[in-house]
């Protein structure tokens, strides 16, 4: 991770190799001081170079396995990753931030795919599985925030932010496909 801009890069070659340890060091709470953990709250941009969207992560069996393995060792995405609800006026960086977060979340849905809807193409997944995973991310974020002394008010704001960001992802996706706007 580049310390100056807090960007955490996970190259596709690392994903294909399946080894999570080389990429964990910059964001591993066991390796960081409490001050460093505190300072990274909601500040880390996750980037997976050479991908064209979240579907290249959650639809790839190798990537799904990698990110599930990563989550089992590092369940702190809800704490570290930079998020904000998105709209049609959001910057491309905000879209990428939320897309990366959602790609990780969709990796935890057992069956995921595309389906036809009356409004166009939709994503088919188990909302209960996605909800359970998001709830775990929120709980783990609260746990880590409590450990480093982030005030309860800030922890609750983060929980709301995660929920609003997830909802905005689905709201925004309706605007991506012109057939979905009818």
Image (tube, rainbow, N blue to C red):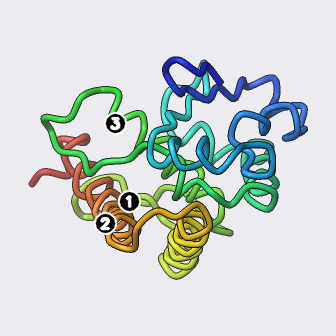
Q: Residues within 10 Å of mark 2 (few under 14, many from 20)?
A: few
Do tag 3 and tag 1 residues touch (Cβ < 8 Å)?
no
Q: Nearer the viewer, residue 146 or 13?
A: 146
* Residue 22 horizontal/vertical position (percent): 86, 31
Q: Residues within 10 Å of mark 3 (few under 14, many from 20)?
A: some
Regarding mark 1 in the picture, which secondary structure is present there? Answer: strand
Q: Residue at x 49, y 49 (%)?
A: 41
* Residue 157, disc: 2
Regarding mark 3 in the picture, which secondary structure is present there? Answer: helix
Q: Residue at x 23, y 49 (%)?
A: 172
Q: Residue at x 20, y 52 (%)?
A: 180
Q: From the viewer's perspective, is residue 26 above or below residue 1?
A: below
Judge left or right: residue 86 versus residue 125. left
Regarding mark 2 in the picture, which secondary structure is present there? Answer: helix
Q: Which residue is mark 3?
A: 95
Q: Which residue is mark 1?
A: 116
* Residue 87 horizontal/vertical position (percent): 17, 44
Q: From the viewer's perspective, is residue 73 above or below residue 139?
A: above
Judge left or right: residue 18 versus residue 182. right
Q: Nearer the viewer, residue 168 or 81?
A: 81
Q: CA distance from mark 2 to mark 1?
A: 36 Å
* Residue 144 horizontal/vertical position (percent): 61, 64
Q: Residues within 10 Å of mark 1 (few under 14, many from 20)?
A: few
Q: Nearer the viewer, mark 3 or mark 1?
A: 3
Residue 115, image quadrant:
bottom left
Q: CA distance from mark 3 to mark 1?
A: 24 Å
């Amino acid at each position: 991770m580049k310390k100056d801009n807090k960007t955490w890069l996970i190259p596709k070659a690392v994903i294909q190799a399946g080894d999570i340890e080389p990429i964990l060091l910059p964001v591993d709470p066991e390796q960081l001081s409490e001050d460093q953990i505190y300072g990274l709250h909601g500040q880390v941009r996750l980037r997976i170079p050479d991908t064209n969207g979240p579907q290249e992560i959650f639809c790839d069996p190798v990537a799904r396995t990698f990110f599930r393995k990563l989550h089992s060792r590092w369940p702190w995405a809800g704490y570290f990753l930079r998020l904000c609800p998105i709209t049609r006026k959001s910057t491309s960086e905000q879209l990428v931030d939320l897309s990366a977060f959602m790609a990780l979340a969709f990796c935890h849905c057992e069956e995921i795919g595309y389906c036809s809807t009356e409004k166009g193409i939709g994503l088919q997944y188990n909302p209960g599985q996605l909800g359970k995973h998001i709830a775990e991310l929120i709980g783990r974020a609260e746990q880590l925030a409590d450990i480093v002394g982030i005030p309860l008010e800030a922890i609750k704001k983060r929980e709301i932010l995660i929920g609003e960001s997830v909802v905005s992802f689905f709201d925004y996706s309706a605007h991506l496909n012109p057939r979905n706007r009818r």
